[in-house]
Image: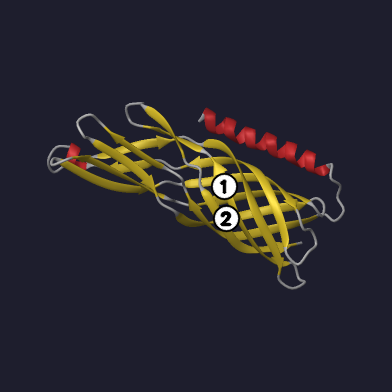
């Protein structure tokens, strides 16, 4: 709980600093932009372990499609500050194998909900296609995991192994484009990005281990400027 509170405070402090820094760029034509987008996330997570008795354990993630909501304040032609919240649930599949004795597989979805604060640096402002670079920080909320590995329990019983997953503060960057749709404020928006974040897993015995998650992301959506 304390770690999650500290993460939120860190994101808030950095957000204030980013706004203060961005305000130095001037406010030639300030304005707001709201965005709704689909989001594809592809985590870079894979873990394998083989013991001296050929006992094999592995876990691997799959990609997922979710959605995001964003709000940007355009401070000047070349600078904006954007807050985005996203929701996805990539799957984490596990496999335990002891040759000729045990072969158990199960999968669960991992809630992956980053809240990012970015400084959007517009490289081609006021052009038919506005290209921007967006360094960012992120407070990442992770869901917990549970797996049914019944082979390890008494006959006829279900065995659910639960893992608590801690939240994290990460960093990343995105390259995005905005394409105006007419002259009424509607914009087609898209981006590709990368987020450096870890997740710490703790089992029921209190043992824990951290893993890199580090997803590549892609978004496509509709924005409205006002």
Color style of the picture: secondary structure
Report which quarter residue 35 is drawn in. bottom right
Rendered residue at 40%/51% (across/down): 62
Tell me the tag on residue 68.
2
Dots 2 and 1: beta carbons under 8 Å? no
Q: Which image quadrant for residue 140? A: top right
Name the quarter where the C terminus is drawn: bottom right
Task: Return the residue at label 1.
Answer: 194
Q: Position of residue 22 (x, y in %)?
A: 79, 43
Q: CA distance from mark 2 to mark 1?
A: 15 Å
Between label 2 and label 1, give the one nearer the viewer: 1
209, 113: nearer the viewer: 209
- Residue 1 falls left or right of residue 103: right
Among the two numbered marks 2 and 1 on one chain, the one whose residue lies closer to the N terminus: 2
Residue 129: x %, y % from top left? 73, 64
Residue at far top of view: 206
* Badge 1 density bin: few <14, some 14–19, many ≥20, Cα 10 Å: many
Q: Classify mark 2: helix, strand or loop.
A: strand
Q: Is residue 186 above or below residue 154?
A: below
The extreme bottom residue here reads 182
Q: What is the x, y in percent for residue 195?
A: 56, 44
Q: Residue at x 51, y 41 (%)?
A: 141
Examine the rendered structure and indicate whether residue 105 appears above or below residue 35.
Answer: above
Judged left or right of residue 55, residue 68 is right
Residue drawn at (36%, 26%) of the image? 206
Residue 158, visible in the rendered structure? no
* Residue 207 figure quarter: top left
Residue 210 visible in image: yes
Residue 79 rendering spot, x and y as whole percentages: 78, 50
The kind of secondary structure element at disc 1 is strand
At x 19%, y 44%, the residue is: 103
């Amino acid at each position: 709980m304390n770690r999650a509170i500290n993460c939120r405070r860190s994101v808030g402090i950095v957000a204030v600093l980013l706004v203060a820094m961005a305000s130095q760029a001037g406010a030639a034509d300030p304005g707001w932009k709201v965005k709704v987008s689909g989001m594809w996330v592809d985590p870079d997570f894979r873990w394998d372990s083989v013991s001296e008795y050929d006992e094999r354990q592995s876990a691997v993630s799959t990609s997922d499609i979710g959605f995001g909501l964003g709000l940007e304040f355009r401070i000047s032609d070349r600078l904006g500050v954007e807050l985005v919240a996203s929701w996805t649930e990539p799957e984490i599949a596990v496999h335990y194998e002891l040759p000729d004795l045990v072969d158990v597989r199960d999968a669960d979805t991992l809630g992956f909900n980053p809240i990012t604060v970015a400084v959007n640096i517009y490289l081609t402002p006021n052009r038919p296609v506005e290209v921007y670079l967006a360094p960012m920080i992120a407070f990442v909320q992770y869901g917990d995991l549970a797996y049914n590995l019944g082979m390890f329990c008494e006959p006829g019983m279900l065995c659910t192994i639960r893992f608590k997953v801690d939240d994290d503060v990460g960093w990343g960057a995105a390259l995005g484009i905005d394409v105006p749709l007419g002259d009424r404020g509607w914009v087609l928006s898209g981006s590709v990005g990368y987020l450096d974040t870890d997740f710490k897993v703790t089992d029921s015995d209190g043992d824990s281990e951290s893993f890199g998650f580090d997803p590549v992301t892609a978004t496509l959506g509709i924005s409205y400027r006002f």
